[in-house]
């Protein structure tokens, strides 16, 4: 039986722990210190308690490791990977927003999942809102993972067109995360025509950068994403909005920064990305 480990007992990490635990998998959850975390489904009263083991004291090598800390916390866990939780054949799945940070991890079998698991952590309680999907590139390791988790709530997708999915999520995050974080307002902010136009222009520029990277979307990508945003409840925040409101570090470097750096590499004119990225980088 494969041994699973998860670093980061937060919204995404605890949801993965729950999903695997429900179907009887052997799962170890690692955090900053020995503690517990409570998990519950939105609108359900039943809470599930998970033991969290201090990562720095861990000496339990796992076969599949999910890394579910925020991008801003990745550097702090890297020193513990090799000695504490992985062996030479372990498979590492990074479950973070943004892109480009996988290169920080020095290991042959590493993958960056496009994450569709929505939840929130408040103190030591995690509420899961919706979705259980991790989108990964297609190869033997990811197919193995799909096979061993097929009886669980986790939905592992192994995709030939994985880069398109990476870019789609990057562009979705570029629009709504930028405007909600900068205005410190949840989705209701799109009721302002000026902010709506800014958001749309960010999507246009994001798509232009994707095209320079040889990723091609339908002509109406921006309209279809704006329609998705329109369906968001007014009081719905984004991860970057909540980080801004709670004065936590923002994941700007690997979302807006990743796209901005590529726009510079391709010598594109992306003034909306450039100016909003400049302001976000100051937080
Ligand atoms: P989160 O709730 O803040 O969870 C991160 C967890 O990592 C926290 O429990 C944190 O502990 C822990 N951690 C931080 N530094 C650590 C360290 N040095 N050693 C061990 N544990 C450490 O974040 P999240 O919402 O799950 O987000 C994780 C990633 O998924 C982010 O990139 C996010 O953008 C992405 N994502 C999230 C969602 C969502 O709905 N939440 C959806 C899609 C993608 P403390 O609590 O002690 O800080």
Image (cartoon, rainbow, N blue to C red):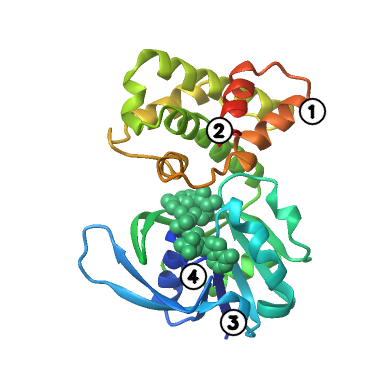
- Residue 265, numbered label: 1
Q: Is residue 163 above or below residue 72?
A: above
Front position in the image: 93 or 140? 93
Q: CA distance from mark 2 to mark 4?
A: 29 Å
Image quadrant in which the N terminus is located = bottom right
Front position in the image: 245 or 257? 245
Q: Which residue is mark 2?
A: 171
Picture coordinates of residue 145, whole percent (x, y): 59, 69
- Residue 150, numbered label: 4
For the residues labelled 1 and 3, say whether their Cβ atoms are less than 8 Å apart: no
Q: Earlier in the sequence, mark 3 or mark 4?
A: 3
Q: Which residue is mark 3?
A: 2
Cβ(mark 3) to ligand 1 < 8 Å? Answer: no
Q: Is residue 205 above or below residue 37?
A: above
Q: CA distance from mark 1 to mark 3?
A: 42 Å
Q: Is there any visible trace of residue 154 in the rendered image?
A: no
Q: Which residue is rendered at x = 54% and y = 43% of the image?
A: 250
Front position in the image: 2 or 66? 66
Q: Which residue is rendered at x = 57% and y = 20% of the image?
A: 204
Picture coordinates of residue 259, whole percent (x, y): 66, 32
Q: Earlier in the sequence, mark 1 or mark 3?
A: 3
User: Which mark is nearer the camera, 3 or 4?
Assistant: 3
Q: Position of 58 compared to 100: left or right?
A: left
Q: Position of 58 compared to 140: left or right?
A: left
Q: Position of 235 compared to 202: left or right?
A: left
User: Which mark is nearer the camera, 2 or 1?
Assistant: 1
Element class at badge 1: helix
User: Which mark is nearer the camera, 1 or 3?
Assistant: 1
User: Which mark is nearer the camera, 4 or 1?
Assistant: 1
């Amino acid at each position: 039986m494969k041994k699973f480990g998860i670093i980061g007992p937060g919204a995404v990490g605890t949801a993965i722990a729950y999903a695997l635990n429900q179907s009887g998998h052997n799962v170890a959850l690692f955090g900053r210190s020995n503690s517990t975390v409570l998990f519950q489904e939105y609108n359900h009263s039943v809470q599930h308690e998970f033991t969290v083991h201090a990562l720095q004291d861990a000496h339990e090598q796992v076969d599949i490791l999910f890394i579910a800390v925020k991008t801003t916390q990745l550097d702090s866990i890297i020193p513990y990977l090799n000695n504490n939780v992985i062996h030479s054949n372990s498979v590492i799945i990074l479950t973070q927003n943004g892109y480009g940070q996988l290169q920080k991890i020095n290991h042959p079998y590493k993958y960056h999942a496009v994450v569709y698991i929505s939840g929130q952590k408040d103190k030591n309680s995690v509420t899961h809102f919706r979705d259980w999907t991790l989108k990964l590139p297609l190869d033997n390791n990811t197919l193995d993972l799909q096979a061993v988790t097929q009886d669980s709530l986790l939905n592992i997708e192994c995709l030939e067109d994985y880069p398109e999915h990476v870019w789609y999520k990057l562009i979705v995050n570029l629009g709504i995360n930028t405007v909600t974080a900068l205005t410190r307002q949840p989705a209701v902010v799109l009721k302002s025509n000026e902010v709506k136009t800014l958001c749309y222009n960010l999507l246009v520029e994001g798509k232009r950068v994707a095209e320079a990277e040889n990723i091609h979307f339908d002509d109406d990508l921006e309209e279809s994403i704006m329609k998705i945003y329109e369906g968001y409840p007014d009081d719905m925040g984004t991860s970057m909005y909540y980080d801004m409101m709670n004065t936590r570090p923002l994941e700007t470097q690997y979302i807006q920064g990743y796209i901005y750096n590529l726009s510079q590499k391709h010598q594109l004119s992306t003034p909306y990305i450039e100016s909003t990225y400049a302001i976000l980088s100051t937080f």
